[in-house]
Structure formats: C-alpha cells, structure tokens
Amino acid sequence: MKYLPHVPSMSCEHCKIRTSKTFDGIGVKVLKIDIKNKKALIETEGLSTVLKELEKIDYPVEDHKVLE
C-alpha cells in the first residue's frame, strides 16, 4: 500500500537522508520525499513498523494518508 505520512520535524536535506536510510533499513520503498511539505510518499505493507522506526530516530509522524 502507498502512504503519505506527515513528518513535521523533517526540514532539511539531512532529515531527508536520515529518514531515507531508515526506510531502506526496514524495506520500505520511498517514492518521494517532499521536504517543503514535510511528507514522504512511501510504499509498504508495514505502516506500524514505519511509525515506530521514525519515532525512534526523533521523526514522529503527525498523521498520514492512505493512498492505495
């Protein structure tokens, strides 16, 4: 499924790299990271894992949309 999580603390290129590495580490396909709007378009079957892992690295998800 595709999700669009809103990550308010994602604000720069470093944040983009750090979240991308986290996504890669848990097998999440990153389709796009939009720093300006603080959102990441991802594809995964394990959203709860994504939410937990982002919380661990101090990038908590405020909300998310299910796209598919």
Image (spheres, rainbow, N blue to C red):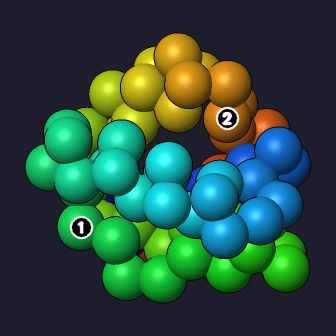
Residue 59 percent across, percent down from the top left: 67, 35
Locate residue 14 relative to residue 38 in the image: left or right.
left
Name the one closer to the observer, 11 or 32.
11
Secondary element type, mark 1 = strand
Q: Is residue 42 above or below residue 57?
A: below
Give the numbered dot on residue 29.
1
Q: Is residue 6 above or below residue 37?
A: above
Q: What distance separates the C-alpha of mark 2 from that of mark 1?
A: 18 Å
**Residue farthest toward the left in the current orientation of the protein:** 27
Locate residue 49 relative to residue 37 in the image: left or right.
left
Locate residue 68 relative to residue 3 in the image: left or right.
left
User: Depth-wise, is mark 2 or mark 1 nearer the camera?
Assistant: 2
Which comes before the other along the chain, label 2 or label 1? 1
Residue 48 percent across, percent down from the top left: 39, 28
Residue 39 lies in quadrant: bottom right
| Residue 61 seen in the current view | yes
Callout 2 crowding tier (Cα within 10 Å): few <14, some 14–19, many ≥20:
some
| Residue 66 seen in the current view | no
Residue 8 percent across, percent down from the top left: 85, 49
Q: Residue at x 36, y 42 (%)?
A: 22
Name the one closer to the observer, 20 or 4.
20
Residue 6 percent across, percent down from the top left: 73, 55
Name which residue type carries label 1: Lys
Q: Which residue is mark 2?
A: 59
